[in-house]
Amino acid sequence: MALRGGDLSRLRQLNSLSAIRELRREGPLPLSALADRTGLSRPSTKEVVDELVGLGWVEEVPPSPGTMGRPARRYRFRADNGFLVGVDIGAHNVRAALSDLDGRLLAETRQPVEPGTPVDERLAAIEAAVEGCLAMSGKTAADLWTVAVGTTGVLSPDGVIRYSAGIPDWRGFDLGERLRAMFPCEVLLENDSRLAALAELRRGAARGSREVVFLHVARRMGAGLIIDGKIHRGFGAASGEIAMLPEARWFDAPEHLNSCPVVPEGTPAEDAAGFTLAAARAGDPVALEAVRRYVEDLAVGTAAMVLLLDPEVLVLGGGFSRSADVLLPPLRDRLARVCVRMPELRASTLGGECVVLGAIEYAVDHLDRQLFAPDGGPELPAPLTAAR
Amino acid sequence: MALRGGDLSRLRQLNSLSAIRELRREGPLPLSALADRTGLSRPSTKEVVDELVGLGWVEEVPPSPGTMGRPARRYRFRADNGFLVGVDIGAHNVRAALSDLDGRLLAETRQPVEPGTPVDERLAAIEAAVEGCLAMSGKTAADLWTVAVGTTGVLSPDGVIRYSAGIPDWRGFDLGERLRAMFPCEVLLENDSRLAALAELRRGAARGSREVVFLHVARRMGAGLIIDGKIHRGFGAASGEIAMLPEARWFDAPEHLNSCPVVPEGTPAEDAAGFTLAAARAGDPVALEAVRRYVEDLAVGTAAMVLLLDPEVLVLGGGFSRSADVLLPPLRDRLARVCVRMPELRASTLGGECVVLGAIEYAVDHLDRQLFAPDGGPELPAPLTAAR
DNA sequence: CACACTTACGAAGGAGCCCTTCATTAGTAG
DNA sequence: CTACTAATGAAGGGCTCCTTCGTAAGTGTG
């Protein structure tokens, strides 16, 4: 349950966390501004801040010059106390990004792989991508607090891959175990569409919403759900797998784009749809018809999601979302025919970095959960006391 | 955000709420047991309890006899400080129930109506049902803190009925406004399937779960979703309306049961399915075939829900759930073919009282939200200070 | 019926956290 | 150099909680 009282120290803890939260949100703040925001008096705020400075969570920054009166001492959250890594293990790329505790990006890398790349080689690519980020930003693995990883497929709650359409070898592989052995810090695993949804929620097309459906439209279809502002995993971490239902007509939908006559002979399968979408944008009637049939199929599963969840925003992401201008209008028309209440349809604004950014946000969330755990929660997390 | 510090009185408030919560959960408790549960020392607990007694939230009960040592004074939450009413406005019945603040039922009534009953007559039936409960339990409208109402159809967030398949006249009607005029207390409105889901979650087949799909199977199909232990409404309060999607094959599914040859000529439409289900239970092959086709259709929309949400439990409720023994095995088979992870399938244990009980639980939740609102929240609610 | 035993009660003394108040300090503006 | 502004730092007081200890109200036994 959420609320718990306790003794006086609990009150101090709450006030410390409150101060940390405000400092994280608003950057450097003078003492009196912080006092206003936390609702504490100035002397109490000072005491709290002094304690946090002593613990290493907060530090003083030079006062801002040119103000009337005695310059106020300013404090900021030490986001450089530790670092977070987000990883996107895709079929064709392994991406990694490194950020500080506020989620500000410091480095990004990419390692090309193939869907058929052997597992060990893929793991090596993951390690190389993270090493690259560490090297670029001058950090070491010991500076990492959390590594959050997204990959295609259904993950069991403890990180075994139950099923993956994109990376056949993944199936049955205990990714969690291997990653935990690889990194000396906390490792989080999540489905890539769900992380993409989180990224759009925090930094992309769905900012400000709490009910969001993220549609991953590409050669493989996927979905990530945000419900009440949080990622929805489901009881067995298997939510969003509506593509498995034949009647939803998602699984074969991309075939309309791949097999369109406008695609030149001998085009590799992964590029075919791009030709059709480009031709449709140029007005080619054959391509437009293929797109129409594609959207017709896409709309069935999508309508099921919208009718069931009634989201505020539906974000179109994944490879095909570069052609959102071609896809969104007919999709909107189709949905309007059956939906009780139309959500807003928007194109992803984050593109290929979606999953990596979502992983970073997921790691930030995890830190927040540790810090602000409602149930009396952990004290300030271990890395802190370890750090200094 | 959840956590906020504050001054000492905030701490006292937290501890008071903590004490109230424990007393509600565990019935009468001696002081030392309460101290253990809240984590406070005995003297502090005493002070908190004295204050709550003064405010009227808590009262002393006679000590339990026959124990060693000096008898401990025991205290209990005064659940009879106010009362809650739950109402189920259905097409054929208006049900009402009255409970104390802990949700313990004190009275129940039922008023028969018809789908075509005029709006004013239906409103009169609501009033009569509630009056009946008040009379049975010797209370007056002034004793009511909250009236929670469930009805079929899609409600706007402020209580206008956007659409209702079961009660045609409902469409466009401002039910919220009329009910607020009818009762001098807080009025809550919610979709009936969602309330049924809540009832099964708290008192029925889904106890202990946090991810539940409630399937209302009857002549009209509906669904209520529990996500993360809470009712999921969606952004515009229109969640769960998957029956509107033709491809989900829910809308016409009951027709398989209604038009089965085993139904005697001239049977009224609302009784037809019962004959088919009864014949299927007896082993009639024609009826079994009709049930098979019905379940085949039912399974499509259901599979969409399960694949999308990955619930722990799927509860079969509504009129047809009396025949769950006939329906569940084939439904389980169908779902197992497509689902990534099978949920548990269970039959409703609450039957026709589902919605009323859900409404009561909804009202109890509302009280809890007021009491335990995480964000510094309201003080103890107004009725209290008004009461004494 | 008196005694020992058990368990809870109630009062006293002390520590921690927060608040308000006020004299002091470090800047800018004229 | 002086007046003004705004933050600082220290002092004093109130509230909530804790621990400790002597007292009270029952049960069980000889």
Image (cartoon, coloured by chain):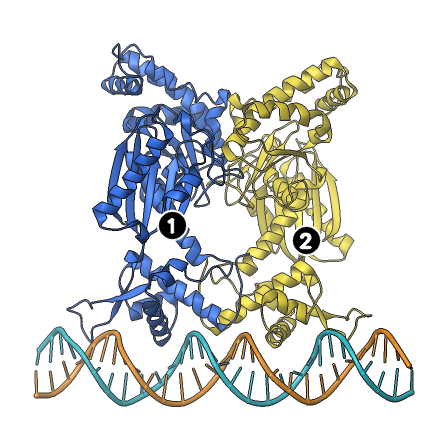
Chain colours: A blue, B yellow, C cyan, D orange
Q: Quadrant of residue A25?
A: bottom left
> Disc 2 marks which amino acid?
Gly
Residue A190 seen from this side: yes
Residue A14's spot in the image, x, y percent? 44, 65
At label 1, which amino acid type do we have?
A: Cys
Q: x, y percentage for residue A347?
A: 32, 33
Q: Chain of mark 2?
A: B
The image's mark for residue A215 is none
Q: CA distance from mark 1 to mark 2?
A: 46 Å
Q: Residue at x 71, y 48 (%)?
A: B97
x, y percentage for residue A183? 36, 46
Residue A111 vertical position relative to residue C20 in the rendered view, above or below: above
Query: Quadrant where the C terminus of chain B lies?
Result: bottom right
- Residue at 71% x, 17% y: name it: B288
Nearest to viewer (mark 1 / mark 2): 1
Q: Horizontal placement of A244 versus A331: left or right? A: right
On whether disc 1 and disc 2 are found on a single subunit, the reply is: no
**Callout 1: residue from which chain?**
A
In the image, A54 versus B132, the foreground residue is A54
Between residues A215 and B256, which one lies in front from this camera angle? Answer: A215
* B101, B327: nearer the viewer: B327
Name above or below for residue B144 compared with residue A99. below
The residue wearing badge 1 is A185
Q: Residue at x 41, y 59 (%)?
A: A381
> Counting other residues with Cα less than 10 Å from the Cα at mark 2, is it few (<14), some (14-19), or many (20 or more)?
many
For the residue labelled by badge 2, is the local secondary structure a helix, a strand or a loop? Answer: loop
**Image vertical order of residue A77 relative to residue A351, above or below:** below
Q: Residue at x 32, y 68 (%)?
A: A53
How many numbered badges does the structure rendering display?
2
Q: Which residue is mark 2?
A: B103
